[in-house]
Amino acid sequence: MPKILTIIGARPQFIKAAAVSRRVKDFNIEEILVHTGQHFDKNMSDIFFDEMEIPFPHYNLNINSMSHGAMTGRMIEEIEKVIIAEKPDILMVYGDTNSTIAGALAAKKIMVKVAHVEAGLRSFNMAMPEEINRILTDRISDYLFCPTQTAINNLKLEGFDNFDNQIYHSGDVMYDAALYYSNNSAGKAEWFHKQNLKPGEFVLCTVHRQENTDSPNRLKSIVEALNQVNDELRVILPLHPRTRKILNETGLKLGFEPVEPVGYFDMIELLKNTSLVMTDSGGIQKEAYFFNKYCITLRDETEWIELINNKVNTLVGSNSEKIVNSFRNYMGQTFPKMNSLYGDGHSADKILSVLEK
Ligand code: UD1
Ligand code: UDP
């Protein structure tokens, strides 16, 4: 039976593991989960393990709140020890965080095969730490599971056909998670029900990207836009701890009370009931689409280009006028019907059936 060591550490990886790890029981696979500790607040980590079907991690390395180099370096060191102790056949990583590149590097250097879920995505912006992480992880991965045809094309254009790897079009495990967990989210979204929010009477927003939080001008402009939007329709902003810290440090004032990060069931109910979504998150851009909501993306580029091509997502960067105009423009528009862009909701099974062999 193949033994897989799966590295998770940041919030989006818990959602992805909630799609994949819950399916492992139906495959001839042993999975060991390693939490790097990158995210650690209760509402950024434990809440997902408590409410979703993710096995409790076998290891928590407790590595967080450091500079990129220190965090990645410490993770490589500790993950290597776990690999040596557990002797997995394959190490699996998700996405593009520091936990992703650390896991991939630790494994590859000691001849353990690497599987990368969410391979091939590109923003073509090398100033993003995530772009560096995903390019390097792809290059040293043996199994590349691409969520979209665009991702496969990106790899081919970079010459991946000439490298020693296997590329699969698996679909997107976040779509699996959205379909599966939305079946009973209403009954489990306790926080959401307490807020007494009416459908369409609020705008769901999230902001946490380094390019926005660490640029005083960009953050100021986004805050101004959110304050203006909030004058027209209530903004619900589950605030990432990174952004909360920087708002506190800079003294930038939101004209409304943000809320704490929420669990996934509450997030699904927010997505189902919001008028539209404003975000710089990678995952939430897709989730807006899964729940038939327009998305205003607070970035200059996106990896999820098919959403732009289908005109359900618009890139506005941090310009406050563009953000507010885009909000006004999308309000009242009916979300178009379209075929699934991200697979059939069974991506996890496709991935696990490859790894099982
Ligand atoms: C990370 C990922 C990013 C991803 C995001 C998802 C990298 C380079 N970035 O960014 O790609 O979109 O996660 O949310 O890996 N913090 C807390 N409590 C927590 C988590 C973080 O206080 O539970 C604080 C940390 O102490 C740090 C800051 O937030 O000061 C940033 O955390 P970090 O994990 O470095 O990066 P993210 O911005 O969360
Ligand atoms: N999410 C959540 N609660 C929140 C904010 C996000 O459950 O308060 C979920 C969201 O629904 C998505 C994932 O976390 O599934 C995305 O995480 P994030 O935006 O932090 O990271 P990114 O996708 O940008 O890497």
Image (tube, rainbow, N blue to C red):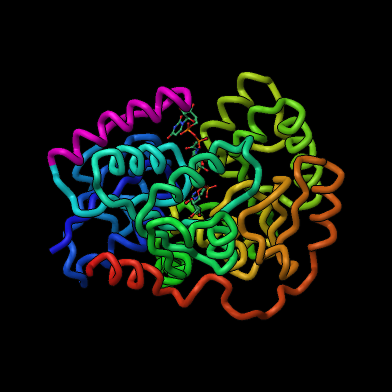
Residue 13 part of the magenta segment: no
Answer with left or right where residue 328 lies relative to residue 249: right
The chief SS type of the magenta part is helix
Q: In the image, residue 356 lies at what x, y percent?
A: 23, 68
Residue 68 belongs to magenta span: yes
Camera-side residue of 230 and 315: 315
| Image location (x, y in percent) of residue 328 | 84, 57
Q: Is residue 43 visible?
A: no
- Relative to 182, 149 lies left or right: right
Q: Residue at x 12, y 39 (%)?
A: 85
Which stretch is magenta?
A: 61-85
Pick the front one: 326 or 91: 91
Image side of residue 53 versus residue 260, left or right? left
Judging depth in this view, the residue of 154 and 261 nearest the camera is: 154
Residue 36, x across and y down, in percent: 32, 37
| Residue drawn at x 43%, y 46% as measured from the top left | 137
Q: Nearer the viewer, residue 118 or 335?
A: 118
Query: As displayed, is residue 313 above or below residue 231?
Result: below
Determine which quarter of the picture holds residue 217: top right
Question: In the picture provided, is 126 more to the left or to the right than 111?
Answer: right
Number of numbered discs: 0
Res. 28 visible in picture: yes
Give the residue drawn at x 59%, y 65%.
Answer: 150
